[in-house]
Image (tube, rainbow, N blue to C red):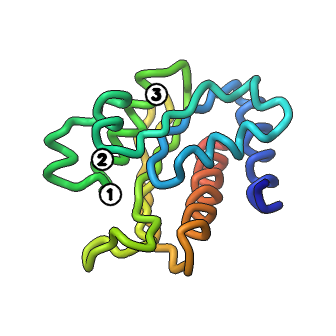
Amino acid sequence: MFPQEIKTVAEMLVDAARDRHLRIVTAESCTGGLVAAAITSIPGSSEVFDRGFVTYSNRAKQEMLGVAGDLIADMGAVSEPVVRAMAEGALARSNGLISVAITGVAGPGGGSAFKPVGTVHFATALTNQDVRHREFHFNHESREAVQMAATLTALQLLVERAEI
């Protein structure tokens, strides 16, 4: 189902989370649950995965994660402040200790001069620590390629954060 590189990083994440007694939660928009699916495809992931929020619509971000509607209206759903709020909201509304949030423009439409197709914002949060943000611009030809690149990146960022 997933490319080998994604499987390998997901296995690394499950191992790192198990070693550090971390429970993982995801908050996904443009990846539509692919990060959660990649994690749960690994045997033993039930020991470390708490839940995944698929908050594709702005309303879902507000209702499920507590992202302020004004923040979305002012900054846009694909923005650093919104993805940070998503990561924090996922931790606050779960039993997770580490979260990743993803929001972006997977394409092929929906991009703009300021937020072209392939723009994806990520945030990781660890209980009682700072929220970290990264922005990537994936220049892939298809929606699926952007989603797979974003899934891999989210997993890598979780591994990086879990190993601290």
Question: Which label sits on residue 12?
Answer: none
Q: Residue at x 77, y 31 (%)?
A: 45
Amino acid, disc 3: Leu
Quadrant of the rendering where the C terminus is positioned: top right
**Where does the image place residue 145, in percent across and percent down from the top left?**
61, 70
Q: Quadrant of residue 47?
A: top right
Seen from the viewer's position, the closer of residues 104 and 122 is 104
Amino acid, disc 2: Val
* Residue placed furthest toward the front: 109
> Would residue 87 be found to the left or right of residue 21 on screen?
left
Q: Earlier in the sequence, mark 3 or mark 1?
A: 1
**Where does the image place residue 35, in percent across and percent down from the top left?**
62, 47
Question: Which label sits on residue 91?
Answer: 3
Residue that carries the numbered disc 2 in the rendered image: 82
Amino acid, disc 1: Val
| Count of numbered marks | 3
Q: Residue at x 37, y 47 (%)?
A: 83
141 versus 38 height, above or below = below
Label 1 crowd bin: few (<14), some (14–19), many (20+), radius 10 Å = many
Label 3 crowd bin: few (<14), some (14–19), many (20+), radius 10 Å = many
The answer to whether marks 2 and 1 mark residues whose Cβ atoms lie closer than 8 Å is yes
Q: Earlier in the sequence, mark 2 or mark 3?
A: 2
Residue that carries the numbered disc 1 in the rendered image: 78
Quadrant of the rendering where the N terminus is positioned: bottom right
Q: Quadrant of residue 80?
A: bottom left
Q: Secondary structure at mark 2?
A: helix
Q: Residue at x 71, y 41 (%)?
A: 39
